[in-house]
Image (cartoon, rainbow, N blue to C red):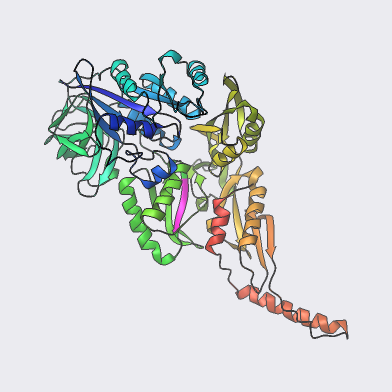
Amino acid sequence: MIQFRNFSIVAHIDHGKSTLADRFIQEAGLVDERQFHDQILDSMDLERERGITIKSSAVSLPYAGPDGQKYQLNLIDTPGHVDFAYEVSRALASCEGVLLLVDAAQGVEAQTMANLYAAMEHELVIIPVINKIDLPAADVEAAREQIDRDLGLDADDALLVSAKQGTGVGELLAAVVERIPPPRGNPDGPLRALIFDAFYDPFRGTVAAVRVMDGELKTGSQILLMASGATHKVEEVGLFRLARESCPSLRAGAVGYVIAGIKTLSDVAIGDTVTLADNPASEPLAGFKTLKPVVFSSIYPVASDDYPSLAESLEKYTLNDAALVYQKDSSAALGLGFRCGFLGLLHLDIVQERLEREFDQSIIMTSPSVRYRFRLKTGEELEIDNPQDYPDPAGIEESLEPYIKASVMAPDRYIGSIMKLGLDRRGANSNMHYPSRGRVEITFEIPLAEIVYDFYDKLKSVTQGYGSFDYELIDYRPNKLVKVDILLNSEKVDALSVIVHKDRARARALSMCERLKEELPRQQFKIAIQGAVGGDIIARSTISAFRKDVTAKCYGGDITRKRKLLEKQKKGKKRMKMVGRIEVPQSAFIAVLKTDDD
């Protein structure tokens, strides 16, 4: 009988996870040289360009042991970014072991630590792997020392691999069979299968990736999704090779897919438990939770005529990404659009780029914001993610904002720069830990709103690219929050409103006013750009009017004649200002909303 081994590869971004998966697939003979291409499990161009895994995937690798025993090695790939932490946790719940990759040149980084803790929480067997040993800058002994000291793992057990050249890949597959235990589970019990991923097939509907924990999943069975309560008839089950390969059933311990006529991706929840409708399990598998967006932004079409096309594109997009939530929104400045919720900044960036590339949409995204809580004097509690919904300041008892625990790892020579960056962003309760010689881990608690703009870029800048960053949400804390409005000649531009900390309001308003001054075209009348909190003006810039030199024809003579002409011009400009409308070009929105230098 074929034995199963279920494992995952976890690593910090760009430590060679996808390249190692490529070598495994070639070693198992699933693809010939003619059809092979790099990052074969990454189906999007965006994933190949950026070198990150956005959507996880799975593949079943046939393997013959030295004793002739046949194995099926189920590699469950995981996304490589903190935004997709829940998907990673569900993939790990489907495994018995992980390969923890450490770059021989860069060593242990922030997400390496985060992935180690996640694997420990699921009580998985951890096999440390030192990758990229072929690089000229590789320092294997330093990497071993960091594995021993930082991760607390036995460095002698670490396997040396060059995924690029294929060195050590055969030994690594043998170690997977030897060290990772076979799946536990009751093959004769009621069916329980964990949905760890799902994707949309335009011809078959939703394809759910499952790990069968107990029982057996057969074609033709009537299944029940325990979180949603929906029942469906199984049309097909099978294994993930490079293409889907159908089979009669999936027994306990197997990883595969199930197609059951589920029409949309939103009908399937990641982490849900599949059981049989006529013989259901007594309780679902632990760990299920509904995904909640963390970062919010509004999307508007550049041309208002493109609104129906954008609506259709978002509907199609959510077939492949159920984590994106959106609802209709409107702005006096930008017209009709959609308010969207994202798992994090990378998720926001990916959605924007895919809408522009795959659906040919020209869009404007408003400034990213987070979800704030307001306790009103009436006792009511509101959750606000859109500055336009900011309650009346007179009725606010207390305002709260979400905090995160940020962990930064970098060489110790950058301590001063990192601490300054953290303090500038209202970081507090900082702790320093030296996991190994020359490296420091700094943790601090910081408001989520302070990292949604350009924190990661600034960190990479101050650490010259050596800093790595990981974070987790902790709680909501009271803070003085105000809404900053931008006024153009006393008219509010709603799409530019932002909620900020009271101490940051003036700096933010000044920055926005100055940028608008650079971007707005001059008119025949003066334009006053103001930043306001409630009725108080806290910042101002003025764009002067185009002026004709009306006194040019006056050569000498009485000064009152010149004054009379200037007064006449002034009255005309005033009248023009009353009837003139200021058109805010798209470049101005992009300049103000896309960057932040306060």
**Magenta segment, which residues?**
296-300
Residue at point 36%, 23% (across, down): 168
The answer to which quarter of the image holds residue 133 is top left
Residue 279 magenta: no
Give the percent coordinates (x, y) of residue 13.
45, 34
Q: Left or right of 591: which side holds 71? A: left
Q: Left or right of 273: which side holds 438? A: right
Q: Left or right of 14: which side holds 197? A: left
Give the percent coordinates (x, y) of residue 419.
64, 31
Q: Is residue 288 visible?
A: no
Residue 532 vs 134, above or below: the answer is below
Residue 578 vs 263, above or below: the answer is below
Give the percent coordinates (x, y) of residue 385.
48, 46
Q: Quadrant of the N terminus?
A: top left
Name the residue furthest right.
Answer: 557
Give the percent coordinates (x, y) of residue 131.
43, 26
Q: Is residue 177 visible?
A: yes
Q: Left or right of 573: which side holds 7? A: left
Residue at point 38%, 30% (across, down): 165
The answer to which quarter of the image holds residue 35 is top left
